[in-house]
Every structure is written in structure tokens, then in C-alpha cells.
Amino acid sequence: MHCFNHQKTSAVCACGVCLKGLCKECMQPADDKFVCSLTCAQLLQKITRLNNYAMSVYGINKSGGPQKVGMRTAMLHFALGITFIGFGAYSAVHFGDWGLTCFASAVGLIFVVQAYKTYKRGLRL
Ligand SMILES: [Zn+2]
Ligand SMILES: [Zn+2]
């Protein structure tokens, strides 16, 4: 690939916006890329801002992984669910109270299902 402005000079990089080939003389640093002109530099700024906004909407951080907060919530709900189910089993064995067991197990199950849903959603993002 040759420089867009200098047909005889080979390009060392390409504009991060319009993908024109650029030689050492023509390349201009902008953010973590190189651009060919001020117009492209401004465009790149706009794109970066838009993308950052979109990533924040979808809960994606800069490293590209799912947000840790969602995972933490899932773990918390899962632990709560297990505690409720455990309490239900405990009350069945020690008190013989099956009404309480059913109630605790149902609540525990809801928490576990909720945790699973949150976890799946975290993975998809
Ligand atoms: Zn350009
Ligand atoms: Zn050039």
C-alpha cells in the first residue's frame, strides 16, 4: 500500500477513519490511532464518544468484558437462594414443619433462578 498523498512512498499506517494509506510524513496521531486529516481526527473523536456511550449502555467496560456488578449480584442472589433452601431442609429435619420448608424452598428457588438469569445476561453482553 502506498501513501494516499505521495504515490511513490510506501505507507506505514492507514487512517483509522477513512483507511487511506499514510506515510511517516502524513500520519497524524489521534487517540490510539493515526488519521490523515483534521476532518478525520474530529470524526474519530465523535466515533469514540459514541462508542463509549454505547458501551456504557450495554454495560461493557473498556476491556470488553461483561460488567462485574452484574456477576456480583448473581452470586449474591445465588448464595441467598442456597441459604433459603438450606433453611428449608433444616426446618424439615429439625422442626418437621413442611409448610415452612415449602415456603423457604420456593423463595430460595426464585433467588437461584434470578441469579441464573442475571448470570446468563452478563455472559451475553
Ligand atoms: Zn482519513
Ligand atoms: Zn504521505
Image: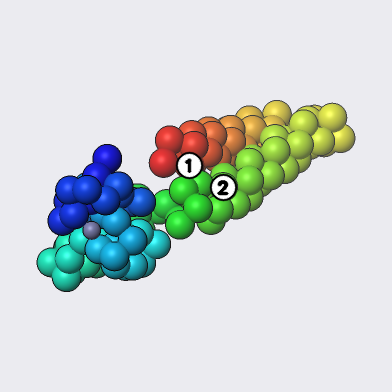
Quadrant position of the C terminus in the picture: top left
Q: Position of residue 49 (x, y in %)?
A: 26, 65
Q: Determine contact: label 2, label 1, CB under 8 Å.
A: yes
Q: Quadrant of residue 29?
A: bottom left
Residue 4: horizontal and vertical position, in percent? Answer: 17, 51
Q: Residue at x 39, y 62 (%)?
A: 32
Label 2 sits on residue: 71
The type of residue carrying mark 1 is Gly
Camera-side residue of 93 and 61: 61
The x, y position of residue 28, in whole percent, is: 29, 67
- Residue 3: give its label: none
Residue drawn at point x = 29 percent, y = 56 percent:
23
> Left or right: where does residue 40 sit relative to residue 124?
left
Q: Secondary structure at mark 1?
A: helix
Which residue carries the number 1 mark? 122
Residue beneath the point at 50% across and 53% down: 63
Relative to residue 18, is residue 103 depicted above or below?
Answer: above
As shown in the figure, which amino acid type bears the numbered disc 2? Met
Can residue 84 be seen here? The reply is no
Q: Residue furthest right?
A: 94
Q: Describe the element under mark 2 as helix, strand or loop.
A: helix
